[in-house]
Amino acid sequence: MNRRDFIKNTALGVGAVTLFGSRAFNVHAGEILPKKGKRVVVAGGGFGGATAAKYLKMMDPKLDVILIEERASFISCPVSNLVLVGLKEMKDITFSYSTLAKKYGISVLNAKILAIDPVSHKVETSKGSVAFDRLILSPGVDFIYDNIKGMDARSQELFPHAVKAGPQTIQLTQELKAMKPGENMVMSIPEAPFRCPPGPYERACLVANYLKNNKKGSKIIVLDANQDVVSKAKLFKAAWKDYYEGIVEYHPDSEVKEIKAETRTVVASSGEYVGAILNIIPEQKAGSMAFMGGLMPQGRRWSPVSALSFESSVHKDVHIIGDATDGDVIGSMPKSGFVASTMGKAAAASVMAMLAGKEPVSPYLANTCYSMVNEREAIYVTGVFEYDPQTKKIAGKKAAGGVSPERSVLLGHQAEDWAKGIWSDTLG
Amino acid sequence: MQGRVFMAVVFLLYAASMAIAGVPGDGERLAETCTGCHGTKGASPGNYIPVIGGQHAGYLKKSLVEYRDGLRPGGVMANLAKGYSDGQIDDISKAVASWKWKNSPIKSAFKGKKLAVETESCVACHGKKGEGSADTPRITGQSPGYLKVVLQEFSDGKRKSPEMELIKGVAATELDKLVIFYTRK
Ligand SMILES: Cc1cc2nc3c(=O)[nH]c(=O)nc-3n(C[C@H](O)[C@H](O)[C@H](O)COP(=O)(O)OP(=O)(O)OC[C@H]3O[C@@H](n4cnc5c(N)ncnc54)[C@H](O)[C@@H]3O)c2cc1C
């Protein structure tokens, strides 16, 4: 049995069972926010969802738009690696949804989505059920631990991934602070695709920079399940060599097989490693909402959608965007906040057209991910993507895809401004 | 004849796709991919990423073409601009120019009494208020960090423009004053 089949038979099978078993739609839940005119419900207020809701309202201020998000505030993954090493604080990456409500008239419902019924056009939330004409889901990612022996519930708490900014970001920050000089941190990177391809490598740089300045003799040991650095490889490796020789220890082709919690040991395909801190980034799948209402076909872990309209391939009137979408179906793109944001805008435009009974409109997408290699300098990767009616997939424009020729302080400034720009475009 | 009918049908289809109530056309949708960095409607909140919303269409187009063709120094723009055809650049420039200019929220602090800086020559092309026109950019209210970077590029001869030759070799301290002048509170 190969790896892919294994995933199919374990992690995904389980996801599908919970979907049809315990979380069937509860028709008796009281309806809240009764629907009058045409309504779009956006579920998940991350980069994709919040942007979609805002751009829907910018197109038609009269449209009834409800944004449902379980968190009381928006916490940004971008820049969270800087929080880990004390260069930024949680308050710098935490934002309110109130501008979306006040300035754009979006009804922001702070509730957890429990079930989705695409047929009767309802979502069940922790605060009651909400009806929709069209639903846009931006579920983000969830984690697959089944392939790592010993990664039980307790180990999952002990060894944070910090790939969803929030409590785990704080936990890892505190662990780094408490680590004794000479002790090591082990970070594992799963096989691609995963959220934010350059994210873990940026983390390696920033943690190494922190160790260099604060923890003499400490190292960050990077166990990468991939054959090489997945994004901006040359630039990251140059930074490791020029700045962090002997501090970043990089092991490609190192898939994590087992965690021994008592001895803080990681058993990987390339050997055994011990760390005072284990930052285990597991394999990923679409967020839990993508598995509700039969929207995820059996045996899959990313949502199949139309590359033109982002409408689910399984159910009409439900659109799925962001990290959760299946690159094999729509065309391969990085799972980034920038891509999720442009998908949000594109889906919003097609949803508007389809609400009016018209054909969806062509999506235009882009990506840029800056990564800090220390407190001042950054590097970047870019991409421009367009729908190809021939293949019915989204394809990258070759000439526009690239990386920065080098790292620089100016790019460091622009990286900071990029974050300000996308936060304001998403929430402001 | 047949060709003409075909063209007419294509045009009608095109017009129909443009005409969906409330749904932005291709230029606007393309330009919306820029706002992740440049801010909604091109009103950049950052110091080193320029305001583009409401900039003159002629200048926007010239800039994008020059980034694309490697004629103007750029970072991300040198990559991204390569993703767009001439027609798309035209559409994007029109859409971005139609947005309302908003001065950068970042202003240069100036504490002295009078800023000793010669701006009469600038007025000749950029206008009395630095508002620009056609191929000459608006500069008043631009992001200060960005303005300093481009003025330095003109001074160093890295960014080439016959009209801006006057900046060549000008010292950084003088450039700082120009930046303050056009971006002060
Ligand atoms: C360390 C790190 C650094 C990164 N840096 C960058 C970067 O520099 N640039 C970049 O472009 N991207 C970056 N990313 C990636 C970026 O964060 C993601 O790609 C982006 O968040 C994806 O957006 P999304 O809308 O798909 O998902 P999310 O932003 O995760 O949004 C999903 C939302 O749904 C909510 N939700 C989930 N389930 C429910 C439920 N049942 N009920 C209600 N709400 C629910 C969640 O709370 C969340 O708010 C980084 C990621 C990490 C981890």
Image (cartoon, rainbow, N blue to C red):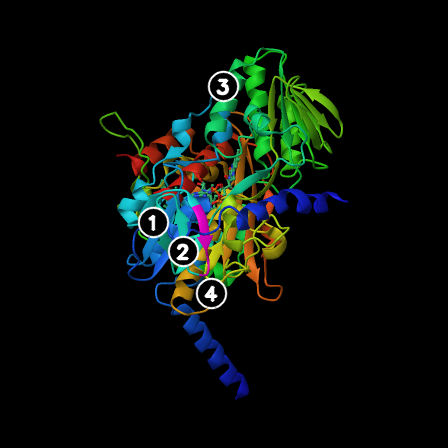
Residue A116 included in the magenta stretch of the image: yes
**Residue identified by numbered label 3:** A174
Q: Which of marks 4 and 3 is nearer the N terminus?
A: 3
Q: Give the range drawn in magenta.
A: A114-119
- Please tell me whether mark 1 or mark 3 is closer to you in this view: 3
Label 3: chain letter: A
Mark positioned earlier in the residue sequence (2 or 4):
2
Dot 2 corresponds to which residue? A122
- In this rendering, do the residues under marks 4 and 3 share a single chain? yes
Q: Quadrant of the C terminus of chain A?
A: top left
Q: Measure the C-alpha gap from mark 2 to mark 4.
A: 23 Å
Q: Which of label 2 and label 4 is nearer to you?
A: 2
Tell me the CA gap for discs 1 and 2: 59 Å
Q: Which of marks 4 and 3 is in front?
A: 3
- Disc 1 vs disc 3: Cβ atoms closer than 8 Å? no
Q: Is mark 2 within 8 Å of ligand 1?
A: no
As helix, strand or loop, the secondary structure at mark 3 comes to: helix
The residue that disc 4 covers is A360
Q: How far apart are marks 2 and 3 (CA)?
A: 41 Å
Residue A114 versus residue A180 in the image, above or below: below
- How far apart marks 1 and 3 lie (CA) works out to 56 Å
Q: Magenta stretch: residue A277 in it? A: no
**SS label for mark 2:** strand
Whether residue B54 can be seen here: no
> Badge 2: how crowded within 10 Å, few (<14), some, or many (20+)?
many
Dot 2 amino acid type: Lys
For residue B125, the mark is: 1
Which of the pair A282/A369 is nearer the observer? A282
